[in-house]
Amino acid sequence: MNRRNGLMAFLLSCALPAAALAQAPAAPTDFPRKPIALVVPFAAGGPTDVVARTMAPLMGAVLGQSVVVENRVGAGGTLAASHVAKSAPDGHTIFIHHNGMATAPALYRKLQFDPLKDFEYISQAIDVPMTLVARKDLPPNGLRELVPYLKANASKINVAHAGLGAVSHLCSLMFRQAIGVDMQTVPYQGTGPALNALLGGQVDILCDQTTNTTQHIKAGTLKNYGVTTLNRIGALPDSPTLDEQGLKGFQVVVWHGIYAPKGTPQPVIAKLNAAVRAALKDPSFQQRVKDLGGDVVPESKQTPEGLRTWLTAEIDRWSPVIKSAGAFAD
Ligand code: MLT
């Protein structure tokens, strides 16, 4: 064997086991060995919590262990994300988060985690529109009356949200920019408590997901000024969109992803992904999501790669917008 062939033979002998490994079936795993914590970055009773608590028992049934929702609130969801990023990568701590995972790197200059380096990706879950709602005795009816009312009363109006970087915050920011009115904002630890404050009349306006607002809009306990999709939605067919009422192109859809700490073994991720997909396929889950105005994502997004690709695109989309606006949360 000459020197060149010898080198080839050596490289091939290194490459063959690697190729064989890549094709090998996933190693068997004893996961899960104990209950799994599903960390929610906002308060109990809010929209993220509702998704988590609806999925948890369905996932638990597939995994043969309880999936226990754990609310870790604060800093627009970033405290929970850094907690999960530092948790043991064994699959017993997982995380649900929304668009905030993509906007945090631009909004927070001192972030304790990197969404693209510190996590494994399990699956996307559901997409949810938002609604612009107010306490039921706010005088204006419809967006056309609301805008001049807000302009005339800006200093007296309080807008609730779930912390800097929460989607309720981003949506209200977009709305205030769209109508050119600056109003005082009041942060809560989730839109669960923010909505309670709205129902109690302690704040005036909130932009929140339909998973939290639909039942109150239907019951007439909140005033609804419109949905944030470009087309009307099945759960609230009588609700106009903000776009059709004159805020052209106003669109916010909240997407949800499920994550695990970086280094969680792939066979464990595969088991968690199968449990998420089973929950998303469950007819009772699908009906509940539909009734609350959401959509289960297509199967192409119910994969680790689907979530990672989506998150990367969303970070690329939002970072320049947020940075050029000079909007920082810290
Ligand atoms: C929540 O679950 O409380 C909301 O998703 C928070 C938010 O508005 O981002």
Image (cartoon, rainbow, N blue to C red):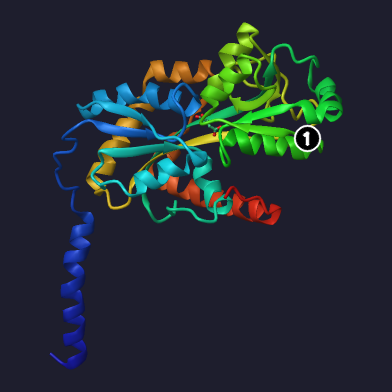
State the quadrant of the N terminus.
bottom left
Where's residue 137, x and y in %?
73, 11
Q: Is residue 227 visible?
A: yes
Query: Which residue is at the front of the view, 138 or 288?
Result: 138
Secondary structure found at label 1:
loop
Q: Is residue 10 above or below residue 265?
A: below
Where's residue 176, x and y in %?
75, 36
Q: 78 left or right of 93?
A: right
Q: What amino acid is at disc 1?
A: Lys
Where's residue 98, x and y in %?
50, 37
Mark 1 within 8 Å of ligand 1, using the beta carbon: no
Q: Is residue 251 visible?
A: no
Query: Which residue is at the front of the view, 262 or 285?
Result: 262
Where's residue 8, x and y in %?
21, 82
Residue at mark 1 = 248
Q: 218 left or right of 269?
A: right
Q: Residues within 10 Å of mark 1 (few under 14, many from 20)?
A: few
Q: Quadrant of residue 179?
A: top right
**Residue at the spot 18% in from the left edge and 32% down from the top edge:** 34
State the residue lying farthest toward the top: 219
Q: Is residue 223 above or below residue 315?
A: above
Q: How many marks?
A: 1
Query: Which residue is at the front of the view, 226 or 85?
Result: 85
State the residue lying farthest toward the bottom: 2
**Residue at the spot 69% in from the left edge and 19% down from the top edge:** 134
